[in-house]
Image (spheres, rainbow, N blue to C red):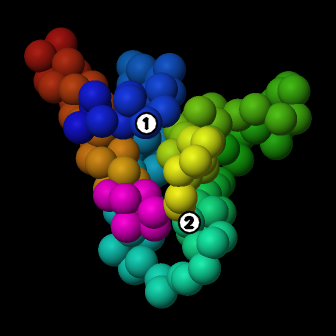
């Protein structure tokens, strides 16, 4: 799974090493899973990109409560914690030169990405359990 995703587009540089990142990662994964489960019947040459935009917006809505503290903090106004997790959704939808969009394949890549994020969160849980 990781190799398949990595071959398609390099995975985000994200390490789940805090409770905050753990919760944020699980929120992204759960939203991806929900959106993949309700796969719309989009058709046409932009279907894959349209769905990527829908999933991205759903994830942004889901993590908004996790990022409320940014309103009072100093940020660059562009990036935020988890930005790399969200941007990967659209990166997976990119096509290579000469490649036609394949919404079914994109859906499977999203499913794998959600599972990968869950695994990252579970590694943190295991680490925390062992640390006591």
Q: Position of residue 108 (x, y in %)?
A: 32, 58
Residue named by callout 2: 48
Q: Give the left or right position of residue 97, taking residue 74 as reference.
A: left
84 relative to 104 in the view: left or right: right
Task: Kindly identify the residue that appears in the image at 40 percent across and 54 percent down.
Answer: 110
Residue 58 location, quadrant? bottom right
Q: Residue furthest left?
A: 130
Check the picture and name the quadrant holding the C terminus. top left
Residue named by callout 1: 8
Q: For the residue labelled by badge 2, is the local secondary structure a helix, a strand or a loop? A: helix
Q: Can residue 87 be seen in this view?
A: yes
Secondary structure, mark 1, is: helix
Q: Which residue lies furthest to the bottom in this view?
A: 41
The one of 15 and 37 positioned closer to us in this rendering: 37
- For the magenta stretch, what is the residue range? 102-108
Q: Residue at x 38, y 28 (%)?
A: 6
Q: Is the magenta stretch mostly helix, strand or loop?
A: helix
Q: How crowded is mark 1: few (under 14 residues within 10 Å), some or many (20 or more)?
A: some
Q: Residue furthest top?
A: 131
* Residue 59 pos. (x, y %): 56, 57
Is 103 in the magenta?
yes
Question: How would you rate the neighbour count of disc 2 (Cα within 10 Å): few for under 14, some for 14-19, many for 20 or more?
Answer: many
Alpha-carbon span between mark 1 and mark 2: 15 Å
Decide which of 93, 96 is in the foreground and name it: 96
Percent across and percent down for residue 85 are: 53, 38
Taking the image as shown, residue 101 lies to the left or right of residue 71, namely left
Seen in the picture, residue 27 relative to 72 is either above or below; the reply is: below
Q: Which residue is drawn at 65% across and 70% down?
A: 46
Q: Can residue 19 be seen here?
A: no
């Amino acid at each position: 799974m990781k190799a398949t995703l990595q071959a398609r587009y390099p995975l985000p540089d994200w390490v789940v090493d805090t409770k905050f990142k753990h919760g944020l990662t699980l929120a992204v994964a759960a939203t991806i899973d929900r959106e993949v489960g309700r796969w719309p019947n989009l058709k046409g040459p932009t279907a894959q990109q349209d769905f990527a935009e829908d999933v991205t917006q759903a994830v942004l809505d889901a993590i908004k409560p996790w990022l409320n503290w940014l309103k009072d903090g100093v940020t660059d106004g562009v990036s935020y914690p988890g930005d790399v997790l969200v941007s990967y959704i659209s990166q997976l939808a990119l096509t290579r030169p000469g490649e036609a969009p394949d919404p079914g394949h994109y859906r499977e890549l999203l499913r794998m990405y959600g599972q990968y994020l869950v695994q990252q969160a579970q590694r943190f849980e295991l680490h925390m359990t062992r640390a006591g």
